[in-house]
Image (spheres, grey):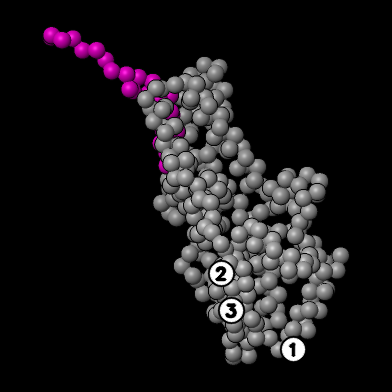
Amino acid sequence: MFNFDTPFFQLKFIQGKLLYELGIQKNKDFLNVYREENRSVVEQKLNLTEEQKQKMVQKLKFLYLPENRYYLYGFLYKNCATEVRDLLFEMVPQDTTFLEKAIGKTYRMLIDECLSGKYWTQFGINLILGSPVDKEATIFYSMFLPSYLQQGLDGMQNNREKLVTGKKLIVKQEKEGNWDLFFLSPFVIFILFFLLLVMFKSSKLGVLFWLVWGMLGVLLVFVSFSDHQELHWNFNLLWCNPFYILFTVFQVGKKEKLKEYLAYFLLICLVFACGVWLLGIQTCDGAYIPVILTVIVLLLRTIFPNLIKTKKKPVFN
């Protein structure tokens, strides 16, 4: 749980300094919340000895003490699901060879599975997540997601017997989630913006483009220095670049030579970004492509201002 009344809540959340806490809630109230939010709840019956049950209860009581209940949240390594996982593994030691098996998916792939149809949310999350989430996950670390925690527990044993002896759907999701419309997705919107720039060659649209993506670049720099490990080493900064703001300043101030030098620098950054994607260091979201095409067109117009102008030829020689 976390407290929305925490001073500077949003800032602490972004910086990775927001304290979460272990809380107690009646099971009935918990299930009602999930029904209201149209989320499913699956119950797994665990094959635990009486001694293990007592140890678990005692550990939960210890963790609930005021001096122990608070912890710093980590999206991949210390969240609501991993806390359950770590508690169970403490009570029921497991063979590490099973837990260390790779699942053939990166953390980013696992996250994208949860965001299917949520185009803008997926774009935003992929933008701020850095290269650490492009590493292949193991069975153990995939359990940061509740669905993979469930699968992981199904494969666990306790004293050479299955840990999970039964499974039951307690709350059923009554309807499908609300998906975003594809024609309003980032990919489509950015393609339309790209076409507008190509067709009309509007300097105002260009300034708006540099300003928006430059500000997003500043945001990426800010979150890259947060305590969230998942946001570090974000190579999206090579194309979502805070230097775009300088480009806006130079364009408004008519500093053509400075614009040209900056354009060459930004093109070099794009080359490095392509290298990062080709080498598999970090994944390229499909919605980036029209943005990058727009960047290339604008940079080429700066370097070669007469590139798209047609010269009039005489009818007769």
Please state, as top left, top right, bottom left or bottom right, where the C terminus lies in the image. top left
Residue at figure coordinates x 55%, y 74% from the top left:
151
Which label lies toward us, 1 or 3? Answer: 3
Q: Residue at x 59, y 90 (%)?
A: 161
Which element carries disc 2, helix, strand or loop?
Answer: helix
Q: Residue at (66%, 54%) from the top-left corner?
A: 228
- Mark 2 surroundings within 10 Å by alpha-carbon count, few (fewer than 14), some (14 through 19), many (20 or more): some
Q: Is residue 168 left or right of residue 102?
A: right
Sequence order check: which comes first, mark 1 or mark 3?
1
Residue sticking out furthest to the front: 174
The residue identified by callout 2 is: 148
Label placed on residue 167: 3
Q: Name the residue that disc number 1 marks.
A: 50
Q: In the rendered structure, which segment of residues is drawn in magenta?
A: 288-317
- In the picture, measured across the screen, residue 18 lies left or right of residue 174, that is right
Query: Mark 3 is on which residue type?
Result: Lys
Alpha-carbon span between mark 3 and mark 2: 15 Å
Quadrant showing the N terminus = bottom right
Quadrant housing residue 287: top left
